Amino acid sequence: MSLYNAIVAVIAGLSVGSFCNVAIYRLPNERSVVRPRSHCPHCGKLIPWYENIPVISYLVLRGRCSGCGAHISIKYPVVELIGGILALLCLYRFGSSVVDTVFAYCFLMALLVITIIDWEHRIIPDQISLPFIFVGIAWSFVNPALSPSSSALGAIAGGGGLLAVGMIYRLIRHSEGMGGGDVKLMAMIGAFLGIKFVLPVIVIASFLGSVYGISIMKRKGKGTRTAVAFGSFLAPAAAFCLLYGPRVLSWYFSRM
Ligand SMILES: [Zn+2]
């Protein structure tokens, strides 16, 4: 990984992070991610390009709109920064192939957008999960680490597996535990990671979700039925498996 490549990756990553902010803000409201241009939600001021530079603009403006002084959420520069860091991690992990780096990075950023939207709105936009099932299968045709059959089987097992878990949960608890959004997300994850990661991703996400659920119950008292946004645990688990796959598998199977 040369310094030049690293700088290009970080700058590109920060910009993609900035685009992801737009997607996170607009997709749950069924609004276009390309139009209109970005503006302050409080005063409507159009944001000029020099106030839209990732991270730097936030620091220069000290987290306030230059028009009305309204507070700008720290979430925006944080998402941009994560975009830059993930670009660097992708380059480090997949840098020997430009195609693999780009596919892996698109997957990670889609997971980031899904994590935040699911956390905030309890929905997983079909506009991301459905097309990305096919993006994942497309990658498998050029990815030396994943065969098209493992990718297709991963999509089927991922979606089908979660659908089955949801049906069992409904039978036992008589309530909706898993949304259709989670099923489509898991199909997308299976397509990108292949069949052998379907179970590890679900296990890691369930573990993280339980830890979170228990900590919430401890704080709010027993008996609170907390609907956990499962997608916002599935997506980070998948990101982790993409970047540290072989290590995850050896850890997982050493405990079987
Ligand atoms: Zn404003």
Image: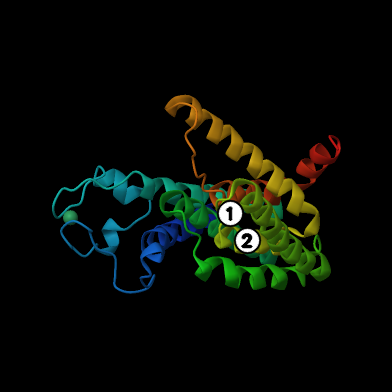
Query: What residue is disc 1 on?
Result: 178
Q: Amino acid at mark 1?
A: Met
Residue 95 appears in view: no
Q: Can residue 44 be seen by looking at this rendering?
A: yes
Badge 1: residue crowd in 10 Å (few <14, some 14–19, many ≥20): many
For label 2, the residue is 183
User: If the image is split into quadrants, where does the C terminus sit?
Assistant: top right
In this view of the protein, which residue sits in the foreground, 88 or 165?
A: 165
Percent position of residue 14, x then y: 45, 54
Whole-percent x and y of residue 61?
Answer: 24, 47
Q: Choose top left, top right, bottom left or bottom right for residue 182.
A: bottom right
Q: Mark 1 or mark 2: which comes first in sequence?
A: 1
Tell me if residue 132 comes above or below residue 60 in the rendering: below
Horizontal side of 234 relative to 142 (left or right) equals: left
Q: Position of residue 186 (x, y in %)?
A: 65, 58
Question: Contact, CB < 8 Å: mark 1 with mark 2?
Answer: yes
